[in-house]
Amino acid sequence: MGWFPSIVADATEFLQQCDICARRTKPLFVGHDIGLFSSSVLADAKPFSIVCADVMYINKVPCLTQQCVVSKFACLVTLRGEDTATLEAAFHKAWDVIGKRPEYLLTDNAAGFVSCRLEGVTRLYSPARSSQSNGMIESLHRTIRMWLRAVLADDSGVNITDAVKRVMKAYNGTVHATTGRIPVEMMQLAVESAEWSRLVAKCVEDADAKLSEATKHDLHPGDIVRVRDMTKYDQQLTKTNETPYSEDRWRVVGFISHKRGLVVNDPNDDYGLYRKVKVTCDGNTRILHVSRLSPCKPGEVDVMDLRRALRRISRESY
């Protein structure tokens, strides 16, 4: 019977390759900017070996953006279209200029990207406009747009091409907020250098921390939360000081399960794996994904409860 445990392990591994089984057995990621790369893959990373790519529009002109996951070095290539041949040519053009080819490439599952034939590159895909899986490249797009607006506002005579070159040069030559290092200098390091080893170790540590913190949430029935505005802050990237969360306070009624329906009392008190939540506020009820919710601090909850109590007292006095 010594062969039985290995057969069970092999069968489990085989079943987990099924997309349906994987979605049902593995919890979805909740946090923002969660990469699809495991710590084992990141540990063997080289400069520009693990890359995220996407298409962004600058003044209605499509551009192919790429960013190294570890070094944060970014490049941008203007496109004449979004067909497969154009994307393939843009990828090879950028890699020839950089002098490096990625080993892993993450893109969305658009038809143009899926049909690209890039030999020697392991392809990874995420849903289109998925902030949970491809948040790093979206953060790059936000930064490029904000910096472009600043450059065009400072110098009205500069054209868009020169502005893009200026922005990308400044981005790669500025200390990155995540790594604390300059991307263009990290791209020139040798894999055996101590500085690159420290950078990879920090990237692996951040990936493990994100996975452990973002896989499960801490919401329970009865919690007070705020709802993130999807329309303004996900579809339109604007530079504003306003909070992306609504001031309305919502109370968690329960969680939605495809087997049990509305779950308001879990015997194991394990709500962290549920992804759909039912919330209510002033008679309005909504069913949302937990990634759109932000738990209120105790001070915020106390103020809301105090106002509710004062309104109840005023109604009873009349």
Image (cartoon, rainbow, N blue to C red):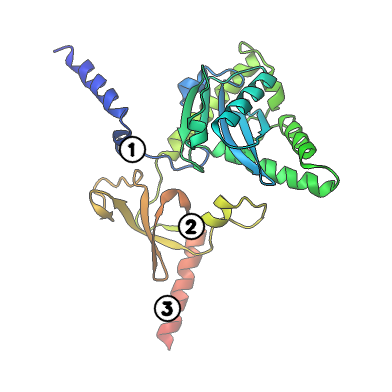
Q: Is residue 285 left or right of residue 102?
A: left
Question: Marks 1/2: CA distance?
Answer: 25 Å
Q: Position of residue 307 (x, y in %)?
A: 49, 72
Q: Is residue 29 above or below residue 305?
A: above
Task: Check disc 3 and report the residue beneath it.
Answer: 312
| Residue 28 x %, y % | 39, 40
Number of residues whose C-alpha sits closer than 10 Å to that of mark 3, classed few (under 14), some (14–19) or many (20 or more): few
3D distance between C-alphas at marks 3 and 1 = 45 Å
For disc 1, the marked residue is: 23
Compared with 209, 248 (above or below) is below
Q: Is residue 35 visible?
A: no
- Residue that appears at 25% across and 19% down: 10
Residue with the mark numbered 2:
227
Q: Amino acid at mark 3?
A: Arg
Q: Residue furthest left?
A: 1
The alpha-carbon separation of the residues under discs 2 and 3 comes to 25 Å
Mark 2 and mark 3 residues within 8 Å of each other at the beta carbon = no
Q: Secondary structure at mark 1?
A: helix
Q: Residue 183 shows which numbered tag?
A: none
Badge 2 element: strand
Q: Secondary structure at mark 3?
A: helix
Q: Nearer the viewer, mark 3 or mark 1?
A: 1
Please tell me which residue is depicted at 69% across the width and 17% down the height of the picture: 188
Q: Nearer the viewer, mark 1 or mark 2?
A: 1
